[in-house]
């Protein structure tokens, strides 16, 4: 599988891309793709109950950049064409980082170059997308950014307690 270079322009998620802000998807730069389509999986590997999926999107025409602010709808045509799946918030589209307050989590942005459109319906889950990618992905790259929600100033939480 050919390697892709994935860039976000930040190492820590700015609030506008999280549940503490506008919850808008970030711009993702994709360098080195020759495939006609891209697919994206964003997940939190540090979630308390195991990996938490924040975004599934596929059939994105391959360009050097997936723009910021992809609408949270199953099928979109603007600002770029894409089909989106069900995240672990039980919503279609992007759901930004939202870890328990005080805990720093790592969020992986995985981008696949795909040789053909994936024939899976909008709202599909991660298992279905990964199954389709197993036979169609020819390129792969990832990057990681962190996010930590802050506790209110002057408040100390008891050990083990999450808000």
Image: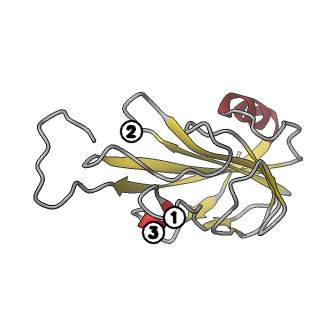
Real-space Cα distance between discs 1 and 3? 17 Å
Residue for badge 2: 46
As helix, strand or loop, the secondary structure at mark 3 comes to loop
In primary-sequence order, the first of circles 1 and 2 is: 1
Marker disc for residue 30: none
Residue for badge 1: 22
**Residue 69 in sight:** yes
Left or right placement of residue 74 versus residue 96 in this view: right
Mark 2 crowd level (few <14, some 14–19, many ≥20, 10 Å Cα): some
Marker disc for residue 10: 3
In primary-sequence order, the first of circles 1 and 3 is: 3
When asked about the image quadrant of residue 1, the answer is top right
Left or right placement of residue 84 versus residue 25 in this view: right
| Position in image of residue 11 (x %, y %) | 41, 64
Left or right placement of residue 106 versus residue 81 in this view: left
| In the foreground, 117 or 97 | 97
Mark 1 crowd level (few <14, some 14–19, many ≥20, 10 Å Cα): few
Q: Residue at x 61, y 68 (%)?
A: 27
């Amino acid at each position: 599988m050919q390697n892709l270079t994935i860039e976000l322009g930040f190492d820590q998620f700015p609030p506008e891309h999280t549940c503490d802000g506008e919850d808008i998807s970030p711009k993702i730069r994709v360098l080195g793709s020759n495939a006609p389509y891209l697919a994206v999986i964003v997940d939190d590997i540090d979630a308390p109950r195991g990996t938490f999926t924040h975004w599934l999107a596929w059939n994105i025409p391959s360009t050097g950049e997936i723009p910021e602010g992809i609408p949270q709808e199953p099928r979109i045509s603007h600002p770029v064409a894409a089909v989106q799946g069900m995240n672990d918030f039980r919503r279609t589209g992007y759901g930004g980082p939202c870890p328990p307050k005080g805990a720093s989590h790592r969020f992986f942005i995985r981008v696949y170059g795909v040789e053909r459109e994936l024939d899976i319906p909008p709202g599909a889950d991660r298992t279905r997308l990964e199954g389709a990618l197993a036979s169609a992905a020819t390129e792969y790259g990832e990057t990681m950014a962190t996010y930590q929600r802050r506790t209110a100033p002057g408040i100390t939480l008891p050990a083990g307690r999450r808000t």
